[in-house]
Amino acid sequence: MDPSQAQSDKANDVHSLEQSDGSEDAAKKPAAAADADKKDAKDTAPADPNSIDATGGDNSEPPPPPKKKSAIKRFWEKFNIYLMLFFLVLVVAIGILVALTIKSNQQAKNNLDTQNLSQQELQQLASTDVTVGNNKQVLTVQANAVFAGSVLVRSGLEVAGSIKVGGELSLNSLKVQGATQLGDTQVNNLTIVGTLNLQGTLALKNGINVTGASTFSGPLTATSITTGTLTLNGDLALTHHIAAGGPTPSIARGSATGGGGTVSLSGSDTSGSITINTGTNPPAGCFATISFTTKFASTPHVVITPIGSGAAGLEYYIDRSTASFTICGANAADPGESFGFDYMAFD
């Protein structure tokens, strides 16, 4: 062995102070090479944090600080995906169960059980008073049904088709929501709260009684109109005669008719004719006094027209009041004359 090499390896435990021959050196060289390979592998391998050297010291380097994880990653690691799927399936199942329950309840309310009657049951109904089914069942009669007696429906009556009534239809009240078409209809008492709109002609046989104000936008045609008071805001256009009717007023003979003279009257308070027949020795004065059947509210306007040649030469005049008017002459009429006067009186 080289003395210089031995001197440099004095600190290693593998060298001995004793001299060895060449065979021992040759045997130890492969072992030394193996130790060198282990040392190289140890140097290149990562340090074990739990390894300690021969002297008892810690040869490992301190571990690096752990990296801080994001909030989403920490939540995802804590949250179990299978638990989330379980809750999702549970919510969907509860929703489906609630929907099916609601639908089942609605169908139970709307759907009624049906029950058909046999021939024997129909015969039993004809002879006895029985109760068939309950209020949740439907009685279906395929054939036509004839009820010889009265039919009482305690609850509502719904008819899907048309109703034909051969006799009288008696209703305590009738409420129609939509349009209604009526043919020949007889109504004993008809009360209309709203507006009555008639597209056709209104024919009334027993007259019309109106207590409130009435407005006619178009022409009004009537054979006879009887009214207490008639107020015209426009012109009065008459295409026929004026007939003033009413009770006939009374007439009293005056002294101007002479001995045995007479007077008579035909007409009404509004208009009429007076006939005067003088007797013997008629003086000047009043021939007749006409008393109205109904007093005027104020002194009326009286217009008289002489009739006949006997009245033509008279200087006639009138005296009037709300109750009567008198026809007089300023000069005496001829004896045995027949003449008269037409009159018109207006308030």
Image (cartoon, helix red, strand yellow):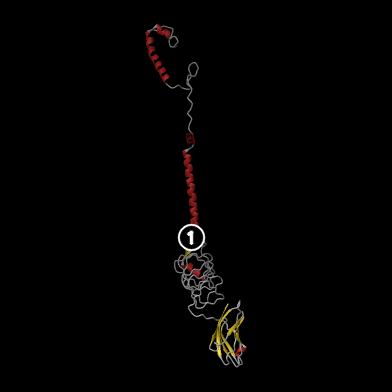
Nearer to the camera, 186 or 54? 186
Q: Amino acid at mark 1?
A: Asp
Image quadrant containing the N terminus? top left
Q: Quadrant of residue 280?
A: bottom right
Q: Taking the image as drawn, is residue 91 in sight? A: yes
Vertical comparison of 216 with 22: above or below: below
Percent coordinates x, y for residue 128 in the rendering: 52, 69
- How far across and how far down the image is residue 326, in percent? 60, 84
Report the residue at 48% width, 42% height from top: 86
Residue 261, position in %: x, y?
60, 91
What residue did someone put label 1 on?
A: 113
| Count of number-bearing discs | 1
Q: Which residue sits at x=48%, y=67%?
A: 121
- Graded by Cα atoms within 10 Å as few (under 14), some (14 to 19) or many (20 or more), the crowding at tag 1 reads few
Q: Secondary structure at mark 1?
A: strand
Q: Is 312 above or below relative to 60? A: below
Q: Nearer the viewer, residue 335 or 182?
A: 335
Q: Position of residue 115 (x, y in %)?
A: 47, 62
> Vertically, is 233 above or below 14?
below
Q: Is residue 291 in view? A: no
**The one of 290 and 60 positioned closer to us in this rendering:** 290
Q: Nearer the viewer, residue 265 or 201?
A: 265
Q: Would residue 343 be found to the left or right of residue 119 on screen?
A: right
Residue placed at 41% from the left, 8% from the top?
Answer: 6
- Residue for point 37% across, 8% down: 22
Q: Quadrant of the C terminus?
A: bottom right
